[in-house]
Image (tube, grey):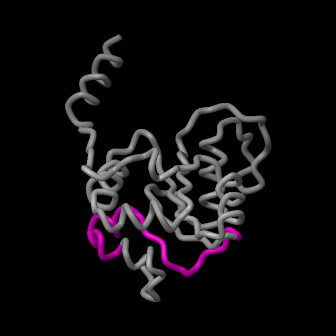
Amino acid sequence: MKKLLVRILFLLTFCTYYESKYFNYEALQVIKDYEEGLEKAKVEGKPIFLYFTCHGCMGDYRIERKQILGDWKTYKKLRDEFINVWLYVDDRKKIEPYISPLSGRTIKAIGNKWADLQYEKFGEQSQPLFIILNKNGERISANQIGYSQAKDGGLLAFWKVLNNDTFVIF
């Protein structure tokens, strides 16, 4: 009981939920399934904005709501020009168990499936991670951006990824 009380107190004290004046999750038509996002991208002929995130990470919220989606030009570009696929690596929704070819572990939750996909396809294990893919699920360029680049480089670093700039951000 004491641990639960401490966790609740921590959440109330340190976890401020950031809202931007532009952020509207529904308007972005976020898809939370990789295969479904690929299918929609092929049908609509749009590139994919792939975002690996987690429900419990304040760094992700800060970048999502304050730095990136709080900018009208960025939000509008994501809304109008991309299929938005957001994969939550800590999602505990149960799936049909299978053995991961990568780790050899039994995967029982969708979040673990997305974490495996992130590492297998993109060689990263940290969140947030933003990657632009073409409609076939292939990287458009080597550009990708994680938390430290977004935090330090802000919108400039993010726009280099969105605009497929040749400058590699790692």
Residue at (71, 54) in percent of width and height: 35
> Residue 140 falls in which quadrant of the image?
bottom right
Which residue sits furthest left? 13
Could you say where residue 169 lies in the image, as x and y percent from the top left? 42, 78
> Residue 118 falls in which quadrant of the image?
bottom right
Give the position of the N terminus as an image quadrant: top left
Left or right of 104? Residue 16 is left
Residue nearer the viewer, 86 or 76: 76
Q: How many marks?
A: 0
Could you say where residue 135 lies in the image, as x and y percent from the top left? 66, 70
Give the position of the C terminus as an image quadrant: bottom left
148 in magenta: yes
Residue nearer the viewer, 39 or 126: 39
Could you say where residue 19 lies in the image, as x and y percent from the top left? 27, 45
- Which stretch appears magenta? 136-157
Vertical position of residue 151 compared to residue 22: above or below: below
Residue at (54, 61) in percent of width and height: 50
Vertical position of residue 8 compared to residue 52: above or below: above
Could you say where residue 18 lies in the image, as x and y percent from the top left? 26, 44
Vertical position of residue 18 compared to residue 51: above or below: above
Left or right of 102? Residue 13 is left
132 in magenta: no
Left or right of 136? Residue 143 is left
Residue nearer the viewer, 147 or 21: 21
Residue at (63, 73) in percent of width and height: 134
